[in-house]
Image: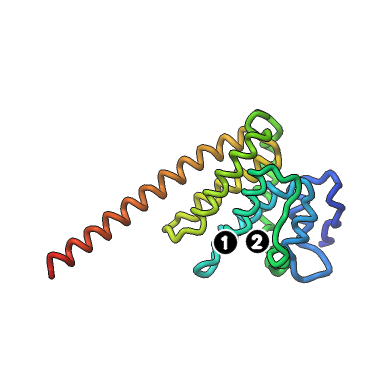
Amino acid sequence: MTPPPILSPDAKRTLSEVIESLGYGDNPKLTLAEVVEAFGERAFGALMLMLALMSLLPWPPGGKAVFSVPIMLLSLELAIQRQTVWLPRWLLRVSVSRAAYRKASGGRVLRAIRAIERLTRPRLPILTGELADVITGIICFVLAVMLALPVPLGDMLPALTIAIFGLAITQRDGLAALVGGIGTVVCGVYVMLVWTTVVAVVTGLLNWVNRLL
């Protein structure tokens, strides 16, 4: 199979085309700097989308936090209305195997992104304007913090919600942003329920130990 050509960032490519093309190149490693360059002006939303989706893959303990840090930075930059993505040099040098990237982003994942692309379009501009970007940035920062917390299954909901917001930013789709807002509420309720349960269990254990003593 002939790999799709790597076009310039300014070319009118769809999100899925850029994601697919990143799987091919002379360097066997795909760096974050290359991803930023490939997405160009769409880098904020696209990077948040990709990092959130990659965090859903099985990683060793602490692996989720690796993805939450750049998402936090991107969220803050979005909130303060930066026009271009800035990331530390050491972070831009972070890389993954291009073969592993192709495996993770290909097949069903790529088909799903293409299907979503067909459903999304610029609409409800009030939910994707400058003020909305500030609010979205703040929300995604909080979600990225949740993503790093050691909460059972607590990383999946924030990651999916960040991915939805990333799609909303990239496609300027206000409806997707609205769905992301609903997802944020669900994430907040879930974390509160888990926290309440943990506090109740710990309190019960302490009371039981005190009775024994």
Q: Mark 1 packing: few (<14 Cα in 10 Å), some, or many (20+)?
A: few
Colour convention of the picture: rainbow
Left or right side of 114 for 175: left
Q: Residue 20: horizontal and vertical position, in percent?
A: 75, 55
Label ID, residue 191: none
Q: Residue 108: image x %, image y %? A: 64, 54
Q: Could you tell me how far apart the alpha carbons at marks 2 and 1 are, in whole angstroms?
A: 8 Å
Type of amino acid under label 1: Leu
Is mark 2 in CB contact (under 8 Å) with mark 1? yes
Name the residue at 59% across, 59% down.
69
Query: x%, y% of residue 129?
Result: 68, 33
> Amino acid type of disc 2?
Ala
Figure quadrant of residue 137: top right
Image quadrant where one finds the C terminus? bottom left
Q: Residue at x 73, y 67 (%)?
A: 93
Residue 201 lies left or right of residue 185; in this view the side is: left
Residue that label 2 marks: 104
Of residues 139 and 172, the one drawn nearer to the viewer in this rendering:
139
Mark 1 lies on a secondary structure that is: loop
Which mark, by number, is residue 57?
Answer: 1
Question: Quick one: label 2 or label 1, which is nearer the N terminus?
Answer: 1
Residue 27 left/right relative to 49: right
Position of 24 relative to 174 (above/below): below
SS at mark 2 in the image: helix
